[in-house]
Image (cartoon, rainbow, N blue to C red):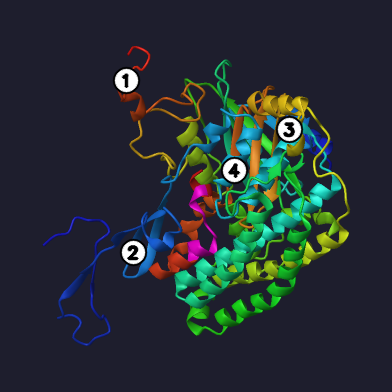
Amino acid sequence: MSLQQLASQIQDTFPVGLVKVVEWRGDLAVTVTRDRLHEVAQYLHDDPAMDFDYIVHVSSVDWPDDEERFEVVYEFYSIKKRQRIRLKTRVPESDCIVDSLTDLWKGADFMEREVYDMMGIRFRHHPDLRRILMPDDYTEGYPLRKDFPLRGKGWRDTFEFLDETAR
Amino acid sequence: MAFEDQRTTVYKVDPAHPESETLPTLRTEELLLNMGPQHPATHGVLKVILELEGERLVKSTPVLGFLHRGVEKLAEDGTYHQFIPHTDRLDYVCAMYNNFAYCRAVEKLMSITVPDRAEYLRTIVAEVQRIIGHQFWLGTQALDIGAMTVFFYCFRDREILLDWFDELCGARLTTSWYRIGGVERDLTSSLLDKLKQFLDYFPPKIDEYVIFLETNRIWVARTKGVAVISAEDAVSFGLSGPTLRASGVDYDLRKAEPYSAYPKCEFSVPLGKNGDTYDRYWIRVQELYESVKIIRQCLEQMQDGPIMADVPSVTLPPKQRVFTNLESMIQQFKLFSQGFDAPPGEIYCGTEAHKGELGFYIVSTGGGKPYRLKIRAPSFIHMGAFDHMSRGYMIADAITLFGSYDIVMGECDR
């Protein structure tokens, strides 16, 4: 099935809830509203014409200027049909929670935990939502958010350096 | 005495014994054991909390992040060219393949076509790196189980290839030889000779490793039928590489989405049947033979030609010109300090590294730096299946299990 056919089939199945479908550089990306995420994912996983049985990665992007600030990105692959799809959804900062897909792909467990750890997006019905790469008692926020500084945060900044120009 | 703990169970020592009714009861409870992060067999700084019943694993919880250096955050601070040396430090045992995967992702973003000779060079070096990776894996896996000879034999042969890398790019491990749009330098005639010599020397050595391991009854008993995962579960967990193919799933990106010079080479993808530790070993050994085949074919087919794509706005000028020509120096300087202007958009590009699918998801909003760069690290995803695969086996099997993932914590924790 070509990417256009795939895109139009998803569009036909979900006339509402689909925000946009983008094809760029041979990648197909489908953005859905947050409340339809699990439903669309279930269709992609279960429908024999889709058959996306393999989870590639779960990621997140921070767009601080947008109203719906965070973007959760899932990438799936179908081993039998040899095709890829990217499923995205947006969440606002005030209520950043989406439905977990761990019931469909077991591998989503660790990947969603990483997204939670790095971006602070929570996943509803996730069996074990804890930090994974940062320490459990880490309280300084979520490192991959854009308002987390790229440099100069931590114990090194508490040092009192001698001001060399003043001497 | 009343035990409030839910996990405490009380039972008779031997219920079949005729005097069982009058015997005192023995209290058993599950034991929590911290393995790592300073355990020599955990391949770095992996920590796993094991819940044990006797010597059986009831549950195991991997505790990751001891080597977390924030590579994805660092990527947002540098230009695309500047990130190449960072990829060396992901999977520090096999830096070349990380460079390769990253450069391919950026080339997809910029839609650059790499010249033919560069593609062949890339494939040759990538397969040499695969041999190094599998040798390293085979040696350490055997050492974890106690077969020390194989470890020495593998590292002896690995040393030849590391010296070859040293001559190729000046570093044994942190190589940074791949460039966006091509490679840094061509193979010299001395390098070609050494590689050809190695290709003749190596296949009998693989047979030697195999004899050492498969005639070792302890090693066979500890790998056959241990840590089995079904094909369905392996796919659902997102396992990749030899770990997935051991369960019989035919998924190899070199075949599924052919890239570089792989479509021009003939090679087979070995598949396992049982999905146990032995099959994961067997696949890697077969891949050693296949890698030798691929390198031979590439060396035969390779023609002379440029080794860097001719896209001056993106690719670096040849090093020789940088030292002698002012414009080339300015070009190099601008590419590293400001970067090239990437089009806004997002791509995912996966590459079949020797551990599994190493992918880069890059979001660009234009400009010289990636807006977001996500690394799909196979080691991290394999650890997600650790609990599922280890349940019911012995503590000692846990060691062989994460040995059989070929786990490197630099990549797992990023």
Q: Please check whether the numbered discs 1 and 3 fall on a single chain.
A: no
In the rendering, which numbered label is found on residue B322?
3
CB of mark 2 within 8 Å of CB of mark 4?
no
Residue projecting furthest to the front: B324
Task: Judge by depth and name the residue closer to the eye, B324 or A85.
Answer: B324
Q: How many marks?
A: 4
Residue type at mark 1?
Answer: Leu
The tag earlier along the polypeptide, 2 or 4, is: 2
* Place of residue A91 in the rendered image (x, y in percent of width and height, measured from the top left): 55, 25
Return the chain for callout 4.
B
Residue range of the region highlighted in magenta in the rendering = B401-410
Answer yes or no: are tags 4 and 1 on the same subunit.
no
- Please, what secondary structure does the residue beneath circle 4 have? helix
Q: Amino acid at mark 2?
A: Leu
Q: Identify the residue under disc 4.
A: B87
Q: Quadrant of the N terminus of chain B?
A: bottom left
Please state the chain letter of the residue tagged with numbered disc 1 in the rendered image. A
When the figure is inspected, residue B186 is found, relative to residue B8, above or below; the finding is above
Mark 1 lies on residue: A162
Q: Secondary structure at mark 2?
A: strand
Report the residue that reaches farthest toward the top.
A166
Separation of residues labelled 4 and 3 (CA atoms)? 24 Å
Chain ID for label 3?
Answer: B
> In the rendered image of this protein, does residue A127 appear above or below residue B262?
above
Q: Nearer the viewer, mark 1 or mark 3?
A: 3
Which residue is found at the position 75% from the left and 57% from the top? Answer: B124
Label 4 or label 1, whichever lies nearer to me, is: 1
Disc 2 to disc 1, C-alpha distance: 54 Å
